Amino acid sequence: MRQVVDLHHASRLVNHGPTVLVTTAHGGRRNVMAAAWSMPVEFTPPRIAVVVDKKTFTRELLAASGGFALCLPVPAQADLTFRVGSESGRELDKFARHAIAAAPGPVLGLPWIDGCCAWLELRHLPERHVEDAYDTVYGEVVAAAADARIFAHGRWSFRDDNAALHTLHHLGGGAFAVPSRVVQGRL
Amino acid sequence: MRQVVDLHHASRLVNHGPTVLVTTAHGGRRNVMAAAWSMPVEFTPPRIAVVVDKKTFTRELLAASGGFALCLPVPAQADLTFRVGSESGRELDKFARHAIAAAPGPVLGLPWIDGCCAWLELRHLPERHVEDAYDTVYGEVVAAAADARIFAHGRWSFRDDNAALHTLHHLGGGAFAVPSRVVQGRL
């Protein structure tokens, strides 16, 4: 059910603050970590900031390759998300350890993890000062896709019948809030 | 039910990606806008990044005063959140227009809006380059509080009986997802 998302809708995928899985690959190595802290910074061009600690293997791989991917996990992946956020991939391949299936993204070939509800590939926009001072990494989206059962025509649709595809929002300690209802504001 | 939140727990308040109301005041003027795009960047010291367009009155006031506040709206404030995110405060006082009641925050005296579920005051950390390039504004939390019915001992607790205090997560077009259930990841 993976469907291409137009780039001018790509920032919408993380507009509501979901926890993401950050994947990277370079020189035959690959990695995945969880990041609760990300946000769009621009719709057009679609740009996103994500906090990735400077000591992580992910930072090393993304700097070397010039890109990273974001995958949005669903409730059935809560354990996986907590686990890959609690260990380093420097010494072990977390994809192998956790039997994570992934397909290469369409532009950068970075791992897009099966079973997620949305996926993005981003080109790294190097910003040395804030990467150093605030661990903030910027990227520009070059490819995006989503499961059409939950995101279509540029919009999320959180309903009871697609609850298995709802996003995760980390509260701390492996507890994730799930956005299961929607309220519509009026002007 | 407003209770002080320890500063080392302050980043948790926005860990799960809620939409926030950004308030500012300077020289007898005040303003409020909605921001869907924010994230913690550090737990200790508690630091948060928020995207505020450089053309907004909020940017002008926060640069002049050196601080800003974040208030987390609840479902009954969805209309208000959509409205203050859709108009400029340069020509009108949005507090007066929308009859928004607020009390001064404890450290900077910035407006903390009544009826929200959590509140923060932040000192602006000027970062001219990313403010210009990505509209990203950094701040360090100097005071935090939350409604103890939904956030206590450093943790959110989203339950059916406190649904009126759940956070809003903007999906676009004034539609907000509300985190109504919680899944617990296991290591």
Image (cartoon, coloured by chain):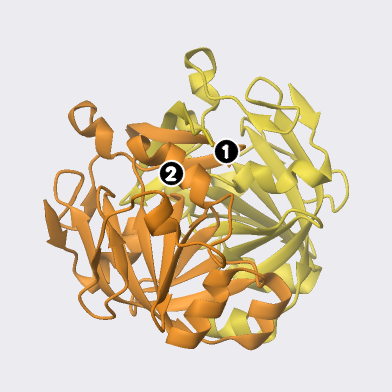
Chain colours: A orange, B yellow
Residue projecting furthest to the top = B161
Asked which secondary structure carries label 1, the reply is strand
Whether residue B105 is visible, yes or no, is no
Using the numbered discs, state the Cα–Cα distance from disc 2 to disc 1 in whole angstroms: 16 Å
Q: Quadrant of the C terminus of chain A?
A: top left
Q: From the viewer's perspective, is residue A90 above or below residue B154?
A: below
Residue B159 screen position, x and y as percent: 51, 18
Kind of residue indicated by mark 1: Leu
Which subunit holds the residue at mark 1? Answer: A
Residue A168 screen position, x and y as percent: 42, 41
Whether residue B108 is visible, yes or no, is yes
Left or right: where A90 falls relative to A7: right
Q: Foreground: A105 or B7?
A: A105
Residue at the spot 71% in from the left edge and 67% down from the top edge: B62
Disc 2: CA contacts within 10 A as few (<14), some (14-19) or many (>=20): many
Residue at the spot 26% in from the left edge and 31% down from the top edge: A163
Kind of residue indicated by mark 2: Leu
Residue projecting furthest to the right = B107
**What label does residue A171 carry, if any?**
1
**What label does residue A80 carry, if any?**
2
In this rendering, the label closer to the viewer, 2 or 1: 2
Left or right: where A11 falls relative to A33: left
Residue A23 screen position, x and y as percent: 41, 66
User: Which tag, 2 or 1, sits closer to the chain's start?
Assistant: 2
Asked which secondary structure carries label 2, the reply is helix
Q: Do the residues bearing badges 2 and 1 touch, measured as CB atoms within 8 Å?
A: no
